[in-house]
Amino acid sequence: MFRLSRTNEIIIDVSTKVLFLYQGESLLYQFPIAIGKNSTPTPLGQWQVINKKILTEDSIFGSRWIGLSAHSYGIHGTNNPASIGTAASLGCVRLYNRDVETLFPLVSIGTPVTITTHHQRRRR
């Protein structure tokens, strides 16, 4: 089991629709994602995790919310798993609920999040 570390970092590649979680230089996980539609794109840039919430009621946000410093954007689960791998959201990053539940305890407030179009995996 991996543990929370201040060196954890999320990199989201919107061109391949993959979220990468690193601990230092080591890739811990990579998850398929849904991104924003062309009319409501996922915001590129350097962000941070600013809040986290376990969602207990059925919601379009699935079972977990990880809020970003990009105002009103976040990483969350979904009640529409068929959307994963597509450009379907209003700009947020969607994961399968099982994946966001894996990611959730491994990030903390302040975890850096880079959203880019050209991520190259780090070497181990």
Image (tube, rainbow, N blue to C red):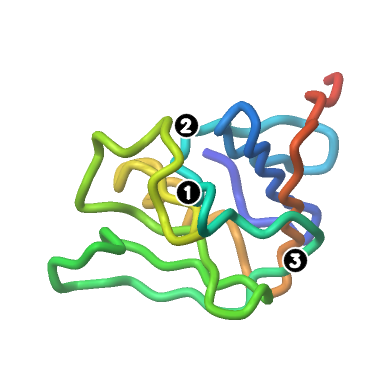
Q: Earlier in the sequence, mark 1 or mark 3?
A: 1
Q: Is residue 26 above or below residue 43?
A: above
Q: Earlier in the sequence, mark 1 or mark 2?
A: 2
Q: Of the residues shown, which amino acid type is indicated by label 3?
A: Trp
- The CA span between labels 1 and 2 is 16 Å
Q: Which residue is mark 2?
A: 32
The residue drawn where x is 77% and y is 31% is: 26
Q: Which residue is mark 3?
A: 47
Q: Which residue is mark 1?
A: 37
Residue 32, percent across and down? 47, 31
- The answer to which image quadrant residue 42 occupies is bottom right
Task: State the residue in front, 74 or 28.
Answer: 74
Q: Residues within 10 Å of mark 3 (few under 14, many from 20)?
A: some
**What secondary structure is found at the residue carrying circle 3?**
strand
**What secondary structure is found at the residue carrying circle 2?**
strand
Q: Quadrant of the C terminus?
A: top right
The residue drawn where x is 26% and y is 59% is: 62
**Mark 1 or mark 3, whichever is nearer to me:** 1
Residue 13, percent across and down? 67, 37
